[in-house]
Image: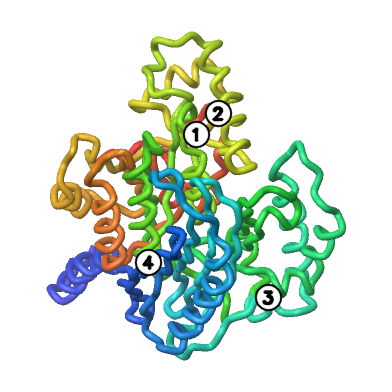
């Protein structure tokens, strides 16, 4: 056999050195995707509050249009706010907030939400959405994503009908309005946003279910709809080519202050997370659970209570599922479909055949120990890998800032944040009952060996 030359050995060595770098390459946060946010509070004569969150993007034209939408909401809704009480929970306010998300290398979506609350109860919600090419300011419409006359519109209509009627299962939606929403004309008018792996259509619940103000979501994962997209939209939603992916998750909540601050942090950096809520806390903090849902985050359960499952009977463990679902339905009109067991003790749940998929984690920030943001960030920088599920706790004082810094740091390193649903959908993984999942990369969901 002929021996390799020094030149071929050099070439092979160079290839081996370059290959890991090429596999690990991912696009950092694009300049056109960078956003700064600030808030302006106005206290009215009756002590009600109007808060407007402003955005500073790469384009003044985008900032101006979003601000004009916000100002119109504030001017219309602010004067009708009732008088606020003297205690913190007797508030009266309208919060005009902006959710933003990026996809591809140039597109961004903005959802402007005007949320009216009285004594912490949501009494009204209105939304407007915009999607732009952030290099030109061009507005992107749904017809720019799906060609008119294609089969995509039937797929969208079926998704709208199926997912909207799954909300409030004991109530009957207005069929006439539902038909209008499912028409091509109705779809063209629907507020929508583009995310890491999904297109989401947004509908205030009162359109179909009077007296409810949840912001209902119709979610379509890119792998399911990509064949029907225009060539340009396929390029701008091909995030797995540009970025590595990660899911940021939060356990043990909700709690009044820190969960609220975590939501604020995620809003300002344009990231969505997944909240594993303790079932017996849902009704006491239903306004926060609803806000988590309405702001585009995903929900899982963290059992009914935060006790050790080894101290509960199989019958008691199985009963938790109905209790959690009942509480969640009362809060937001739909249920969560997976669970994370306190302390990660999933074997007892599987043995009892409770029936949830169980979401573990592959990177523990140890924020539950009260670690500083710098310490948390050091751990994440050192251990992060593609497809990771990051464990945080929204009840801890340092977590709001830690979450913000995690998002900013990893986005600059080429990561895109997905919800748990998106993370598994990217590889076509269907979450099965009584099965445990630790991360997701190339379809591998087993525990990370390193």
Position of 81 with respect to 419 (left or right) is right
User: Do labels 2 and 1 touch, CB within 8 Å?
Assistant: yes
* Residue marked by disc 2: 324
* Residue marked by disc 1: 282
Q: Which mark is first along the chain, 1 or 2?
A: 1
Q: CA distance from mark 4 to mark 3?
A: 40 Å
SS label for mark 2 = helix
Q: Which mark is residue 146?
A: 3
Q: Position of residue 278 (x, y in %)?
A: 44, 31
One can see residue 438 in this view: yes
Q: Which mark is first along the chain, 1 or 4?
A: 4
| Residue depth check, mark 3 versus mark 2: number of the one nearer the observer | 2
Q: Nearer the viewer, residue 146 or 441?
A: 146
Q: Give the quarter of the figure containing the C terminus.
A: top left
* Residue marked by disc 4: 41
Q: Which mark is residue 177?
A: none
One can see residue 423 in this view: no
Q: Position of residue 309 (x, y in %)?
A: 41, 16
User: Do labels 3 and 2 touch, CB within 8 Å?
Assistant: no
Quarter where residue 193 is shown: bottom right
Q: CA distance from mark 3 to mark 2?
A: 38 Å
């Amino acid at each position: 056999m002929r021996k390799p030359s020094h030149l071929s050995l050099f070439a092979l060595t160079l290839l081996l050195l370059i290959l890991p770098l090429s596999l690990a390459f991912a696009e950092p946060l694009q300049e056109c995707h960078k956003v700064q946010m600030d808030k302006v509070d106005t206290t009215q004569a009756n002590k009600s509050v109007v808060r407007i969150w402003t955005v500073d993007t790469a384009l003044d034209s985008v900032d101006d249009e979003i601000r004009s939408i916000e100002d119109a909401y504030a001017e219309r809704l602010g004067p009708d706010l009732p008088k606020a009480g003297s205690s913190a929970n007797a508030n009266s306010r309208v919060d005009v907030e902006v959710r933003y998300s990026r996809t591809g290398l140039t597109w961004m979506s903005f959802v402007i939400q005007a949320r009216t609350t009285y004594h912490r109860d949501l009494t009204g919600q209105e939304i407007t959405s915009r999607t732009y090419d952030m290099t030109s300011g061009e507005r992107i419409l749904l017809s720019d994503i799906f060609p008119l006359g294609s089969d995509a519109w039937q797929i969208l209509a079926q998704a709208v009908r199926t997912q909207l009627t799954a909300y409030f299962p004991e109530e009957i939606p207005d069929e006439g309005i539902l038909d209008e929403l499912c028409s091509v004309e109705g779809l063209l008018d629907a507020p929508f946003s583009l995310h890491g792996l999904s297109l989401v259509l947004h509908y205030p619940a009162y359109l179909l279910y009077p007296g409810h103000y949840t912001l209902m979501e119709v979610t379509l994962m890119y792998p399911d709809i990509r064949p029907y997209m225009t060539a340009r939209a396929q390029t701008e939603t091909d995030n797995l080519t540009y970025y590595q992916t990660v899911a940021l998750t939060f356990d043990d909540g909700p709690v009044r202050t820190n969960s609220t601050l975590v939501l604020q942090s995620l809003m300002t950096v344009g990231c969505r997370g997944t909240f594993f809520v303790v079932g017996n806390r849902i009704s006491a903090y239903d306004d926060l659970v609803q806000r988590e849902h309405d702001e585009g985050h995903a929900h899982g359960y963290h059992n009914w209570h935060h006790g050790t499952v080894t101290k509960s009977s199989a019958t008691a463990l199985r009963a938790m599922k109905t209790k959690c679902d009942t509480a969640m339905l009362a809060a937001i009109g739909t249920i969560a479909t997976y669970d994370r067991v306190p302390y990660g003790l999933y074997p007892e749940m599987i043995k009892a055949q409770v029936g949830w998929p169980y979401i573990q984690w592959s990177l523990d920030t140890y924020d539950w120990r009260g670690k500083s943001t710098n310490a948390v960030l050091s751990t994440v920088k050192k251990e992060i890998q593609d497809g990771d599920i990051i464990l945080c706790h929204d009840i801890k004082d340092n977590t709001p800032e830690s979450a913000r810094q995690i998002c900013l740091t990893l986005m600059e390193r080429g990561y895109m944040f997905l919800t748990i649903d998106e993370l598994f959908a990217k590889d076509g993984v269907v979450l099965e009952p009584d099965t445990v999942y630790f991360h997701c990369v190339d379809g591998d969901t087993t525990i990370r060996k390193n």
